[in-house]
Image (cartoon, helix red, strand yellow):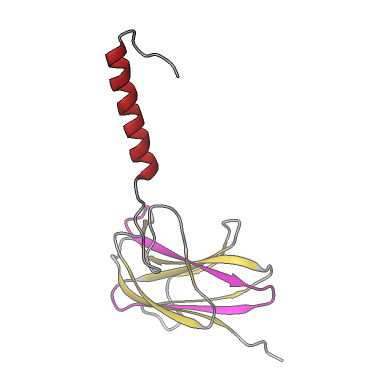
Amino acid sequence: MFRLFNSGKLDKVVLFWMGLTSALVTFYPTPSYGQNSQNSFYNPIPITANTTVDDRLTVGDMPTGEGGFARDYRINLQAGDQVSIDLRSDEFDTMVMLIGDDGTTIVANDDSTEGGTNSLAFARITESGDYIVRVRTYAATGGGAFSLAVTRLKPVP
């Protein structure tokens, strides 16, 4: 222990406040978040292939730097998988991305082949591991409800 001041009473007051501050920092509870929300620490929401996720993109999600927002989902894929990523919304112009473990964009799509504001992307996976499926707005087009489907496609014989 060290002395901050030479007077005995002031030392005790300072040490008391230092101890109280440490206790508050140490025991301050962290908030809990639901399965489908992202908090201030990067924590992608886990999903599996061949399922559909119905969710909402809000101002509480990650800012894209272009005026819009993004939400990340973590999915495990195997080498040789062929996947389709279908993102649909009636409330905003969608953009979907598949991002590798090293941060490389594998595929990205703003508008599906049928036109409109939905997104559809296809990818062939070359390395097994975790990937990020990023749901985002195109530019600053707001947010809202969306449906995301990641499907493993059957190989063509």
At 56% from the left and 56% from the top, the residue drawn is 103
**Percent x, y for residue 109?**
47, 71
Residue 41, above or below 129: above
Quarter of the image where the N terminus is located = top left
Q: Position of residue 10 (x, y in %)?
A: 28, 15
Q: Is 2 placed above or below 150 here?
A: above
| Above-or-below relation of 63 to 137 | above
**Residue 52 is one of the magenta-drawn residues:** no
Is 157 left or right of 135, judged from the image as shown?
right
Residue farthest toward the top in the current orientation of the protein: 6
**How far from the left and from the top, in percent, is residue 129?**
64, 66
Taking depth in this image into account, of 152 and 123 the one nearest to the observer is: 152
Q: What stretch is highlighted in magenta?
A: 65-91
Asked if residue 8 is positioned above or below residue 156 in the image, the reply reads above
Which residue lies at the image location 31% right of the left edge and 12% below the top edge?
8
In terms of depth relative to the viewer, which is nearer, 136 or 51? 51
Q: Residue furthest right?
A: 157
Residue 155's image quarter? bottom right
The percent coordinates of residue 20 (x first, y second) are 32, 33
Report the number of numbered marks: 0
Quadrant for the C terminus, please.
bottom right
Between residues 113 and 47, which one lies in front from this camera angle?
Answer: 47
